[in-house]
Image: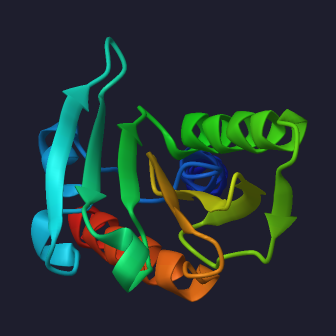
Amino acid sequence: MPRVAFILAAAVLAGCGVGDDEKTIGTDRLDDLVLQPDDLTPGFRRIFVRDLGALPQLRVRYERAGVRATGGPRLIESTAHVFDSPRRADTRVDRARDALKSRRGWHPIDEPGLGGESFAGTFVQGGVRYYQVVWREANVTAALEVNGLEPRLPLSDVLELARKQQRRIAQAAG
């Protein structure tokens, strides 16, 4: 009989972690999950910080003056959502990917290699290059939207910012 109990206990324990075995990040860390002024080059000012409704999420926007002379990003929007599980965060990433694919003029770009799952897209309109990078780490989804004058905003600049935000999220996950 002890052998049967051992096998049953092992089976139950093996099933406990299936699918959601990653660490989770609490909503108390939300402020740490978006880009901070220290993550940016000098000249950016925070123009918008907002918690958006019932879902624990935070969005912060930065703007830089003098972009025409210097190039690089002129507007950066950093967002983080905290979900109750990595699976729900995955669903959010899938929905965001589908929404981006359906937007007119957007083109997917190389996999950015952030978190557990990620994607990116870009388009140019009126001489301005727009990028969107979305990823999931643990139970958090993050998005980075950046624009700047074409051709003065390379993807490498955007991915550098995304990696800074990803490091913040990974630190929060422990």
> Does residue 140 appear in this view?
yes
Residue 17 x, y percent position in the rendering: 55, 52
* Residue 16, above or below 123: above
Which residue does the image show at 79% across and 77% down from the upper left?
110
- State the quadrant of the C terminus: bottom left
Which residue does the image show at 87% across and 47% down from the upper left?
105
Residue 63 x, y percent position in the rendering: 27, 55
Which residue does the image show at 31% across and 21% down from the upper left?
52
Question: Residue lying furthest bottom in this view?
Answer: 156
> Does residue 34 appear in this view?
no
Residue 19 x, y percent position in the rendering: 64, 50
Total marks in image: 0
Question: Residue lying furthest top in this view?
Answer: 54
* Residue 3, above or below 162: above
Determine which quarter of the picture holds residue 51.
Answer: top left
Q: Is residue 67 left or right of residue 86?
A: left
Determine which quarter of the picture holds residue 58.
Answer: top left
* Residue 39, above or below 27: below
Question: Of residues 130 and 7, which is closer to you in this image?
Answer: 130
The image's colour scheme reads rainbow
Question: Of residues 101 and 63, which is closer to you in this image?
Answer: 63
Q: Is residue 14 left or right of residue 121?
A: left
Which residue does the image show at 53% across and 46% down from the upper left?
86
Q: Is residue 15 left or right of residue 51?
A: right
Question: Of residues 90 and 48, which is closer to you in this image?
Answer: 48
